[in-house]
Image (cartoon, helix red, strand yellow):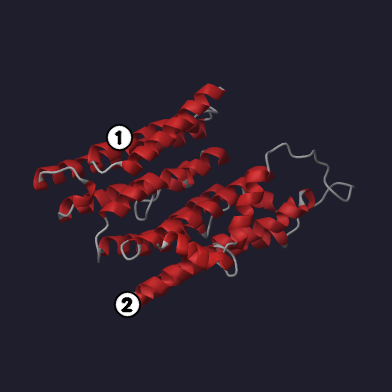
């Protein structure tokens, strides 16, 4: 793909998401979502691999279905209420349809089964966009239509936390593990969205940082499956030491950055009197923590068979740009002491 084509597609991707951000009209928001979907499809198929074409086809069919349901729901809302304003959507039927359509777009359980398969067929470069940037526009619409005491959002959140943890237990492909990780983290955001929108935004911000750092680490190390983690210690000991910290941050273990969002969300749920919901979310997170710890053990405490006569594996210096990895890794590990500053930034 030429530089001009890549720049055009990335610009269209940004314009589509921005259009959804600034829209208060259903048709404009829907148009922004479709621009984002059409812009990422050529990025998915740029290598012309059958697996990439299959992933792009699945993604297009899923997004087209969600877009059709979203357009039908917005039209129904206009027919019932007489206006197209997103924030004025109050009838239960359009609200339910819109919520389900957006859940399908971002991959919330039980509408999640397409995400691991699609992410597995993509390169890590495109996978970063799918796992982070493509969640922003549907999440923005979901935040505008959220209503207090929505049982549907709580059900979607708890189901996503459990399915994200349960689905990742048996995976050996790292991209599928990150896909189920995305499902579980989005469940936490949706769970607290109707009670504290700034807190959900903070959780999304931290999720993007940690996920971007993990994807970038996998790209620099050129690993794609669990068995390739065994030999990392002899290739790059420094990055091998850093990778388990990123994985444990995704698992939300203290004192890493990922723990911050879960702690604040549990505090908010308890304040709202949802102690049972908070307990279920903690139990679901234990499932996710298991496969993150398993990957960390495979990286640091497991040695691959060394058949060479040398003490270290021969390798060329990496030509990849490591500055984004350095910055994102530092943020993904060390933001917990800055909790008061982040609360002041997002909560007010």
Q: Secondary structure at mark 2?
A: loop
Image quarter hosting the C terminus: bottom left
* Disc number for residue 273: 2
| Quadrant of residue 241 within the rendered picture | bottom right
Residue at image x 74%, y 39%?
Answer: 318
In x, y percent, where is residue 207?
50, 55
* Disc number for residue 180: none
Residue at image x 43%, y 60%?
Answer: 346
In x, y percent, where is residue 265?
42, 68
The foreground one among 52 and 282 is 282
Name the N-terminal-most of marks 2 and 1.
Answer: 1
* Disc number for residue 31: 1
Residue at image x 41%, y 75%?
Answer: 279
Q: Height in image: 147 above or below 79? A: below
In x, y percent, where is residue 143?
32, 54
| Mark 1 crowd level (few <14, some 14–19, many ≥20, 10 Å Cα) | some
Would you say the residues marked 2 and 1 are in contact, meaning their CB atoms lie under 8 Å apart? no
Residue at image x 51%, y 30%?
Answer: 50
Q: Please indicate, yes or no, whether residue 53 appears anywhere in the rendered image.
A: no
| Mark 2 crowd level (few <14, some 14–19, many ≥20, 10 Å Cα) | few
| Quadrant of residue 274 within the rendered picture | bottom left
Q: Secondary structure at mark 1?
A: helix
């Amino acid at each position: 793909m030429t530089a001009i084509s890549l720049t055009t597609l990335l610009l269209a991707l940004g314009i589509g998401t921005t259009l959804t951000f600034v829209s208060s009209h259903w048709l404009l928001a829907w148009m922004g979502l479709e621009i984002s979907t059409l812009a990422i499809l050529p990025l998915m198929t740029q290598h012309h691999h059958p697996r990439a074409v299959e992933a792009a086809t699945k993604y297009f069919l899923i997004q087209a279905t969600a877009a059709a349901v979203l357009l039908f729901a917005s039209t129904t809302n206009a027919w019932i209420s007489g206006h197209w304003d997103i924030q004025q959507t109050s009838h239960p039927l359009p609200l339910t349809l819109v919520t389900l359509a957006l859940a399908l777009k971002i991959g919330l359980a039980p509408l999640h089964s397409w995400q691991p398969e699609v992410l597995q067929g993509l390169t890590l470069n495109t996978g970063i966009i799918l796992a982070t940037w493509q969640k922003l526009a549907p999440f923005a619409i979901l935040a505008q239509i959220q209503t207090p005491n929505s049982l549907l959002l709580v059900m979607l959140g708890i189901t996503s936390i459990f399915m994200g943890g349960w689905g990742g237990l048996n995976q050996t492909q790292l991209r599928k593990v990150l896909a189920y990780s995305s499902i579980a983290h989005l469940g936490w955001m949706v769970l607290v969205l109707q009670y504290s929108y700034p807190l959900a935004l903070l959780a999304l911000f931290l999720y993007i940082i940690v996920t971007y750092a993990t994807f970038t680490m996998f790209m620099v190390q050129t690993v794609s499956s669990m068995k390739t983690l065994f030999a990392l210690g002899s290739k790059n000991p420094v990055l091998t030491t850093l990778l388990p910290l990123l994985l444990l941050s995704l698992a939300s273990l203290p004192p890493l950055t990922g723990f911050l969002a879960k702690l604040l969300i549990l505090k908010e749920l308890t304040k709202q009197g949802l102690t049972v919901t908070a307990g279920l979310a903690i139990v679901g997170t234990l499932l996710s923590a298991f496969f993150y710890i398993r990957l960390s053990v495979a990286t640091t405490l497991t040695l691959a068979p060394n058949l060479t006569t040398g003490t270290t594996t021969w390798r060329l210096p990496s030509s990849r740009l490591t500055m984004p990895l350095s910055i994102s890794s530092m943020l993904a590990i060390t933001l917990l002491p800055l909790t008061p500053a982040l609360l002041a930034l997002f909560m007010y």
